Amino acid sequence: MTLLEKLRLRCRGLGRIVLYTSLLLPGAARAGAYEEYFQAIRMDNVYFLKQLMQRGMGPNLIEPKRGYTGLMLAIREDSMKAFDVLVNAPDVNLEAQATNGDTPLMLASFYGNAPVVKLLLAREVEVNRPGWTALHYAAINGSSEIVKLLLDASAYVDCESPDDKMTPVMLAAMRGRVAAVEVLRDNGADLSLKNKDGLTAMDLAKRYGQDGVIDVLAQPPRQ
């Protein structure tokens, strides 16, 4: 083992000792505990996360950068072990909103995490809301599976974004998300709708050279 490798191992071990020692200090409000809580989520370290939660740090703490709760951060960081701990906490808020209005369901849809979407829908979280929605985000991601899950949960297929009046099928079309466009088309998306610039989904597909989408939009919906 080289000297550099030894130093790295030593620093890593010291970091663990510092974090573990800090957990033994009384009171959840002690300096650093707040940062450790979110760091444990980022690292998907459920051992330290559970230790902090047992000392009073609940699942709905909000980090200042984006206004995410721990659950939302776990989704963003794909920390699924931490997510499992947080989503099963007795008082977790599944409808929490970040500073920009994003919810756990919206984040899971944006990052294409179908298992989390399924779980949240099974917990009957709100699918439709004013402004940006989970279906918008699923269309951007292009996951036809998540698009279908949301539609089956009564997501409004022609919801419009707040400023530019973009519908999910428009967003999917301009990004070349062929499978998502197909699902939206087959589930009643109104292809004649126009955004604030007067462009339809077909117009956007042509503007961005999305030939696969153009082919799908030119076909009638499948019954």
Image: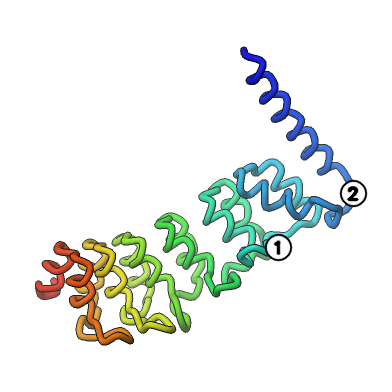
Where is residue 198? Give x, y as percent.
26, 87
Q: Do the residues labelled 2 and 1 touch (CB within 8 Å)?
A: no
Where is residue 111? Give x, y as percent.
43, 57
Please tell me in which quadrant of the rendered image residue 99 appears: bottom right
Q: In this view, does 107 lie above or below 194?
A: above
Where is residue 22? Give x, y as percent.
83, 42
Q: Mark 1 points at which residue?
A: 61
**What amino acid is at disc 1?**
Leu
Q: Is residue 69 above or below residue 186?
A: above
Q: In this view, does 185 lie above or below 5?
A: below
**What amino acid is at disc 2?**
Pro
Residue found farthest to the right: 26
Question: Is residue 41 visible to us here?
Answer: yes
| Residue placed most toward the observer, 99 or 22 | 99
Please tell me in which quadrant of the rendered image residue 34 appears: bottom right
Q: Mark 2 points at which residue?
A: 26
Where is residue 106? Give x, y as percent.
47, 67
Q: Is mark 1 on a helix, strand or loop?
A: loop
Q: How is the image coloured?
A: rainbow
Q: Is mark 2 on a helix, strand or loop?
A: loop
Question: Is residue 223 visible to us here?
Answer: no
